[in-house]
Amino acid sequence: MQPQLTPQQLHEFERDGFVLIRNAFEPKEIDQVVSWVNEVQAFPETPGKQMMYFEKSLLAGGKRILQRMENVYEYHEGLKDLFDSEQVKGVVSDLFREPTVLFKDKINFKLPGGGGFDWHQDQQAGWWVYAQIFITALICIDRVTPENGPLEISTGHHKRGLIGKEWEPLNDDNMKAMKFESIMLEPGDMVFFDSFAPHGSGPNMTDQSRRVLYITYNKLSEGDHRKQYYADKRKSFPPDCERDPDKEYKFRV
Ligand SMILES: O=C(O)CCC(=O)C(=O)O
């Protein structure tokens, strides 16, 4: 099923910096995507392949849990086809009003005890090197509730360009006059958002996971940068299993 954006949804995206599409996937389709996410979640940590990042659970015991996985595109046929599909990439092209190319793919697992994300614009994470603007497609895998760390997005501030500094979360001054909307989701819902839309989220202190796929594209006219982006990221912020034990690594934005 290809979610056909209505003129109203196109308008909302331009006005707000994001648009929510309910039931973008049929139940059978999203069940398939959930089973693919289960498969990659069980992948072993392997240097040079999918990039797996872990965190310490905020719940009692503080065990090491999977926080996010990137670059599964090359290692899972089903997810690769999904990221290349009309249903996801095609809609981003409609929003850009021109052909688009995959920039990065990521699953945020937010398992029980998984931490939140400081307020930021994705564009602050050094993305300028690659392109001027990106659109991310979020696909909801697990139900998102007020308790498990929903995505919170501010409406209408995407038109202000870079609001904060690169590589630093937004500060109170940057966020004056911003209102954030928490987005509750069911599996199969999608959100498309602009790389300048300020957003963040809280931790998941429940006993259920809150997994969400984030697939990011840029305009094809700005070039295909996925391989270079991941080569750069492996150096600057490598996955856990590729780290130098004598070095300290800090997630910035
Ligand atoms: O998944 C979330 O809760 C927010 C994720 C986010 O902002 C990010 O990965 O940049």
Image (cartoon, grey):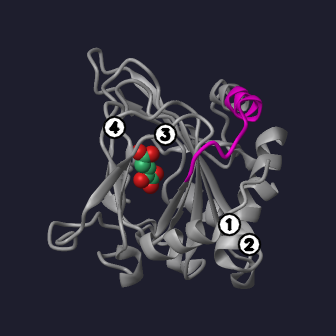
All told, the count of numbered labels is 4
Labelled pair 2, 4 in contact (Cβ < 8 Å): no
Q: Quadrant of residue 204?
A: top left
The residue mark sitting in front, 2 or 4, is 2
Residue at 21 percent across and 69 percent down: it is 175
Report the predominant secondary structure element of the magenta stretch: helix
Q: Is residue 120 above or below residue 189?
A: below
Residue at 21 percent across and 73 percent down: it is 174
Boundaries of the magenta span:
21-35
Real-space CA distance between mark 1 and mark 4, rounded to the nearest whole angstrom: 28 Å
Is residue 225 among the parts visible in the rendering? no
Of pointers 3 and 4, the one earlier in the residue sequence: 4
**Pointer 3 residue:** 185
Q: Which mark is residue 115?
A: 4
Real-space CA distance between mark 2 and mark 4, rounded to the nearest whole angstrom: 32 Å
Q: What element carries label 3?
A: loop
Q: Which residue type carries mark 1? A: Val
The residue mark sitting in front, 1 or 2, is 1
Q: Residues within 10 Å of mark 1 (few under 14, many from 20)?
A: many
Real-space CA distance between mark 3 and mark 4, rounded to the nearest whole angstrom: 19 Å
**Pointer 1 residue:** 92
**Pointer 2 residue:** 100
